[in-house]
Amino acid sequence: MVRLFRCLIPVCLAALVGCQPSRPEAISGQIVDLSYSYDQDTIFWPTAEGFKLEVVFKGENPLGFHYEANNFSTAEHGGTHLDAPAHFYQGRHTVDAIPLERLVGPGIVIDVSEQCSRDRDYLVAIDDFIAWEKTHGEPIDGKIVLLRTGFGRFWPDREQYMGTAELGPQAVAKLHFPGLHPEAEKWLTESRKIKAIGLDTPSIDYGQSSRFQSHVTLFGANIPAFENVANLELLPDLGFTLIALPMKIRGGSGGPLRIVAILPE
């Protein structure tokens, strides 16, 4: 169930982005959760280990009060997660080294769901970004860009979402879902200056990619990516703030991501 909250949250954005903490900004608005829960249904790459939760203790302990504790294990790249640039480019940011200002800021949604409904292998093109800029009269520079393919409606049906329910190396060739055209990634890194990019599919590169060119180009410019982002249909095209904070894994190539959008009053 989607959880929406109306609240007044005193958040020191200055502290988050490395500015002086003496000038906090209060955020007032509606918070939309853009992350899927981790459980036995969480979708991972066909070759990855899934999420596991081991109950250590649950119940009344000998001292007479309730107590719960668990162990968990998970691959870095599964569920709603962040890809760090180091994932596909040597010498670029690992998860813990990504500047916070790349993970907090104004967000926009570029809706390509109509194109993707006609073609599971749709590649988001430069024209899609330019069309958004013309429609809204402003550049995408300085934004966290979210691509809405519409594939979020299939979660957690692995076959519908990924194109196959099979697991193992042989399943990779059967993946079919939209992603970014490598030329669009090149344009984003050379002609625009975005903070980060995310989408509601398992990968920035489309399912049939074998060379992962979009990952390489994007991460060469130290731009992080968010994958398996939830609930994009609840967001407007622009006018909201995104906070996307991953598990801070030292040296990690990626990690679980809690991402939220704050809509204005």
Image: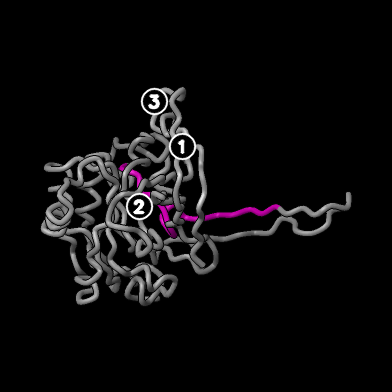
Q: What residue type is labelled 2?
A: Phe
Residue 126 lies, in percent from the top left, at: 12, 55
Side of 222 relative to 39 (left or right):
left
Q: In this view, does 81 lie to the left or right of 195?
A: right
**In this rendering, does residue 114 appear at all?**
yes
Q: Name the residue under label 1.
A: 26
Q: What residue type is labelled 1?
A: Ala
Element type at mark 3 = loop
Residue at 20 percent across and 46 percent down: it is: 140
Q: Position of residue 228 (x, y in %)?
A: 38, 60
- C-alpha span from label 1 to label 2: 26 Å
Residues at marks 1 and 3, CA–CA distance in whole angstroms: 15 Å
Residue hosting label 2: 226
Label 3 close to label 2 by CB (< 8 Å): no
The residue that disc 3 covers is: 19
Cα–Cα gap, marks 3 and 2: 24 Å
Give the class, few, some or many, for how many residues have Cα within 10 Å of label 1's Cα (few <14, many ≥20): few
Instruction: Report x, y in % for residue 237.
Output: 27, 56
As helix, strand or loop, the secondary structure at mark 2 comes to strand
Q: Earlier in the sequence, mark 3 or mark 2?
A: 3
Circle 2 residues within 10 Å: few <14, some 14–19, many ≥20: many
Residue range (magenta): 69-85
| Residue under the image location 38 percent in, 45 percent down | 253
- Comparing labels 1 and 2, the label whose residue is closer to the camera: 1
Q: In this view, does 92 lie above or below 236?
A: above
Task: Tell me, yes or no, if residue 183 can be seen here.
Answer: no
Query: Given the current orientation, which residue lies at the most extreme right position?
Result: 63
